Image: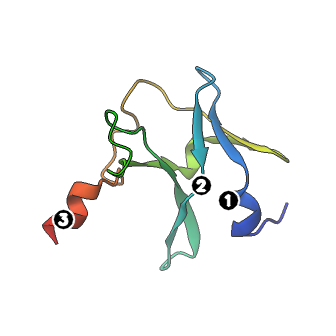
Amino acid sequence: MESSFLELRCKEVVNVLDGRKLGHIVDIVFDLGCARVLGIVVPGEKQGWNIFKGSNQLFIPFGCIVKIGEDTILVELRGQNIPTNPYILSNDDDKKK
């Protein structure tokens, strides 16, 4: 099955273990040396009531993707703050640069 980033971006990402909607894809991470997809990035949960502050972004490894359907991408993520992965991106990292 072939799909473009624009088509993937329109699909909702859902965790199959708890049914939680994680949002829509905001980015795809590639390994250019091996020419393969490492995973997808979805928006994390907002912290508090501040609508102007951005949220952390969650990296989902390609191996956690269970199925890509017509409307939804099903992923299998265990625990609250998973994956515990260096690819979890936060806005705090941007401020340090």
Quadrant where the image shows the N terminus: bottom right
Q: Which residue is mark 2?
A: 25
Dot 1: what SS? helix
Q: Amino acid at mark 1?
A: Arg
23 and 80: which is toward the camera: 23
Query: Please, is residue 49 above or below residue 7 in the view?
Result: above
Q: Position of residue 85 (x, y in %)?
A: 34, 46
Q: Which residue is mark 1?
A: 9
- Dot 1 or dot 3: first in sequence order is 1
At 52% from the left and 70% from the top, the residue drawn is 30
The answer to whether mark 2 and mark 1 are in CB contact below 8 A is yes
Q: Position of residue 11 (x, y in %)?
A: 73, 50
Q: Amino acid at mark 3?
A: Lys
Q: Is residue 95 visible?
A: yes
Dot 3: what SS? helix
Q: Is residue 68 visible?
A: no
Q: In whole angstroms, how far apart are the C-alphas of marks 2 and 1?
A: 5 Å
Q: How is the image coloured?
A: rainbow
At 58% from the left and 20% from the top, the residue drawn is 18
Marks 3, 2: nearer the viewer:
3
The answer to whether mark 3 and mark 2 are in CB contact below 8 A is no
Q: Position of residue 39 (x, y in %)?
A: 53, 56
At 32% from the left and 36% from the top, the residue drawn is 47
Quadrant where the image shows the C terminus: bottom left
| Disc number placed over residue 95 in the picture, else none | 3
- Residue 22: image quadrant is top right
